[in-house]
């Protein structure tokens, strides 16, 4: 999932920890085996997207890294029906 992609990026430990922490709620909800609550991952995924955008603007992520993470996060949001 998205967390693995973050962990494989050559970013600082602080940036990685922050991104992974932001994803933790979404990851728990999406991996709990209960598809009826998947929409609860929408807000954490939105927050992740905002953080990626911030880190891109601060130079903590490259355009390529940010693009990859944004694409994956938006695909997950689309798949689970986030608005």
Image (tube, helix red, strand yellow):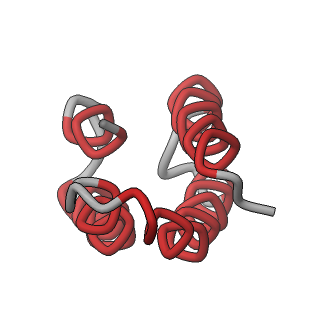
Give the answer, above or below, for where 80 lies relative to 51. Answer: above
Q: In which quarter of the image is the N terminus?
A: top left
Identify which residue, 65 or 48, lies in the foreground. Answer: 48
Instruction: State which quadrant residue 46 falls in.
Output: bottom right
Left or right of 7, for residue 69: right
Give the answer, above or below, for where 24 lies relative to 69. Answer: below
Identify which residue, 11 or 28, lies in the foreground. Answer: 28
Identify which residue, 1 or 22, lies in the foreground. Answer: 1
Identify which residue, 78 or 58, lies in the foreground. Answer: 78
User: Residue 77 at x, y = what percent?
Assistant: 63, 50
Left or right of 48, for residue 11: left
Residue drawn at the location 70% of the way across and 43% of the way down: 78
User: Residue 57 at x, y = what percent?
Assistant: 70, 56
Give the answer, above or below, for where 27 lies relative to 69. Answer: below
User: Residue 76 at x, y = what percent?
Assistant: 55, 42
Left or right of 49, for residue 21: left
Residue drawn at the location 21% of the way across and 29% of the way down: 8
Residue drawn at the location 59% of the way across and 76% of the way down: 43
Q: In which quarter of the image is the C terminus?
A: bottom right
Residue drawn at the location 63% of the way across and 35% of the way down: 75
């Amino acid at each position: 999932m998205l967390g693995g992609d973050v962990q494989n990026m050559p970013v600082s430990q602080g940036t990685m920890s922050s991104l992974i922490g932001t994803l933790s709620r979404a990851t728990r909800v999406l991996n709990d085996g209960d598809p009826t609550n998947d929409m609860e991952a929408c807000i954490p995924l939105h927050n992740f997207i905002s953080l990626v955008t911030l880190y891109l603007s601060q130079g903590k992520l490259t355009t390529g890294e940010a693009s990859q993470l944004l694409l994956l996060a938006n695909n997950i949001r689309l798949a689970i029906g986030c608005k």
